[in-house]
Amino acid sequence: MTFQQQADTGFDHDKALAFAGRMSDFISAGAVAVMTSIGHRTGLFDTMAGRAPATSAEIADVCGLAERYVREWLAVMVTGGVVTYDPAGARYHLPPEHAASLTRGAPLGNLAVYAQHVALMGQVQERILRCFASGEGAAYADYPDFHRLMAEDSDQTVVDQLDTVILPLAGDLPERLAAGIDVLDAGCGRGRALLAMARKYPLSRFLGLDLCADALEDATREAAARGLTNVRFEVCDMTDFAAEAAFDLITSFDAVHDQKHPADFLRRLHRALRPGGIHLMQDIGGSARLEANMEFPMAPLLYAISCLHCTPVSLGQGGEGLGTMWGWETAERMLREAGHASVTRHVLPHDPMNVWFVSRKA
Ligand SMILES: C[S@@+](CC[C@H](N)C(=O)[O-])C[C@H]1O[C@@H](n2cnc3c(N)ncnc32)[C@H](O)[C@@H]1O
């Protein structure tokens, strides 16, 4: 059908062209995101930050990378508006205002860490296509490098703010940790937060449980390298976790929504707390209602992660597959139904994609 024929049927030509332009921008932005992941992994952003404009050969040399590939990467970054280019001297520059959200330790948080999710999504496309056809789930082993990525994510949203912002959410928790209590991190992954707490609070005892042995090997190695003797990590499928009144503090960092049965999991964690114990929980902060997430930070990315990772790994355990955007309302309801005497919800400025709950057992 021609545009003229479509116009006769009420088809809005301008709207169609505007949308095609927007889709083109999405596709280009996706490419920039994958290349941003490469810029992070290779250290290109870190090397360019704070440096005078330099040629591709100079940048490649400092990074120890192949110039031909670096030049091509730089071309993406220049046309994507990330890096500036001076054709006179063929020099490239990463403006400090851009480095402020693209480098390790960046003041605005390193968004390049999240770009890695986009690269990972591309890697699992074939696997997930099979899930679309059959309805089956996937396994953590289907996601190469997932735990390394999550540990970097955790370093930013949890570890960096643990002492100043996160632990004080639960009142005198820092003092109790200093005095010596029993702590469990449920679904700890590489255990970055637990390692940080174990170092800061030598009188407390820390246990990290997770399904994935490879993540725990890294955590155990790191504990040994730091000389920590008050933390241990154990492989455990927590679906049937049956501890009773064994811990004073249970933490879960982004580890409930993709469980097999999140409501049952929260009940088990509640049972594992001693009276007066606290469950400190970080999870995704979107709403359970799609229409309420139109302005939620990076909602399309989170729904994509949900479709390509969180939903399939839950389904793969025979679970409910609630997905990443299960909703803070669902989380709050399940925490209350688990039996907690009080549940408070917090949204922290450094972590707008997540919600934090402090739940206390009577
Ligand atoms: C999104 S990751 C978060 C990891 C870690 N807390 C962090 O912040 O980096 C979710 C974690 O839950 C773990 N997990 C999923 N199902 C589990 C189960 N049934 N038992 C124990 N751990 C599980 C996964 O292996 C994964 O490490």
Image: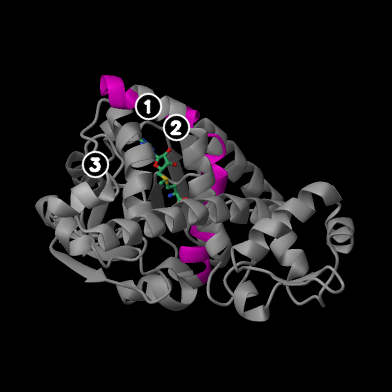
| Helix, strand or loop status at disc 2 | helix
Residue 236 location, quadrant: top left
Residue 145 in magenta stretch: yes
Dot 1 and dot 2 residues touching (CB under 8 Å): yes
- Label 3 to label 2: alpha-carbon separation: 29 Å
- Please name whichever residue, 104 or 49, is drawn nearer the observer in this view of the structure: 49
In the shown orientation, is residue 199 left or right of residue 122?
Answer: right
Residue 48's x, y, as percent?
76, 68
Provide the residue span drawn in magenta.
131-160
Residue for badge 1 = 129
**Mark 3 CB lies closer than 8 A to ligand 1:** yes
| Helix, strand or loop status at disc 3 | helix
Residue for badge 2 = 125
Depicted 237 relative to depicted 283: above or below: above
Residue 225's x, y, as percent?
70, 50
Which of the marked residues, 1 or 3, is nearer the chain's N terminus?
Answer: 1
Outermost top residue: 134
Please tell me how many numbered marks the rendered image carries.
3
Residue 286 location, quadrant: bottom left
Which of the marked residues, 3 or 2, is nearer the chain's N terminus?
Answer: 2
Which residue shows up at 30% across the image and 65% down it? 356
Label 1 amino acid? Answer: Leu
Depicted 356 relative to depicted 73: above or below: below
Residue 4 in magenta stretch: no
